[in-house]
Image (tube, grey):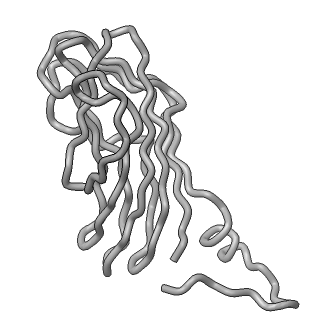
Amino acid sequence: MPVKVWNVGDVLAANDVNVWLAPIVGVKSADQVTSSHTTLINDADMRFAVAANSLYEFHAYVRFASPTGGDWKSSFTVPAGASAHFQRLGRDISGNFAGDSEWLDTDSVTSQGRGAGTPTNAQFMGVLITGGTAGNLIFQWAQQTSNAGNTTLYANSYLTGRRIG
């Protein structure tokens, strides 16, 4: 879908502002803790609705803690027929700063755990291309390796997006 073009004298309707100008945001409202869990969780807060046959840019700021040895993995889930391409800036599974790889929504990106109470940050930037089905872009996360220690996704982590096509 092409980006809407306004002409002099056009009235901006609420729908135009909501679809084309206002950011779409899903903010983590409270800390969420899991342990011994390696299956990706669809986060209840870090998500937003997307239209069919559209293009979105997105950014996620993630503040988490995971036990050493439990580590962390994350990804995104998309509507049927859609695809996401993204980059992660943060520590990789070896603890080195990484950010030059392209990932897909079908990939799990792993990060080294620095301890159950030691916050770590990661950022994701990407593009979502939807097909004929509307739905949600949802951030997913879990432990990389099952560990009885707590893995926490902290409050105020967020996923934001903007329709660009």
Left or right position of 83 against 52: left
The structure residue drawn at horizontal position 44% and vertical position 23%, both measured from the top left corner, is 31
Please tell me whether residue 59 is drawn above or below residue 38 in the rendered image: below
Q: Position of residue 91 (x, y in %)?
A: 34, 28
Choose between 14 and 40: the one closer to the eye.
40
The structure residue drawn at horizontal position 28% and vertical position 18%, both measured from the top left corner, is 113
Q: Quadrant of residue 112?
A: top left
Please tell me whether residue 126 is drawn above or below residue 45 in the rendered image: below
Left or right position of 133 against 149: right
Q: Position of residue 131 (x, y in %)?
A: 32, 78
Q: Position of residue 107 (x, y in %)?
A: 20, 49
Please tell me whether residue 146 is drawn above or below residue 61 in the rendered image: above
Residue at the left extreme, as displayed: 146
The structure residue drawn at horizontal position 23% and vertical position 22%, both measured from the top left corner, is 71
Choose between 52 and 96: the one closer to the eye.
96
Q: Position of residue 39 (x, y in %)?
A: 15, 36
Choose between 42 and 67: the one closer to the eye.
67
Q: Quadrant of residue 81?
A: bottom left
The structure residue drawn at horizontal position 28% and vertical position 36%, both measured from the top left corner, is 141
Residue at the right extreme, as displayed: 9
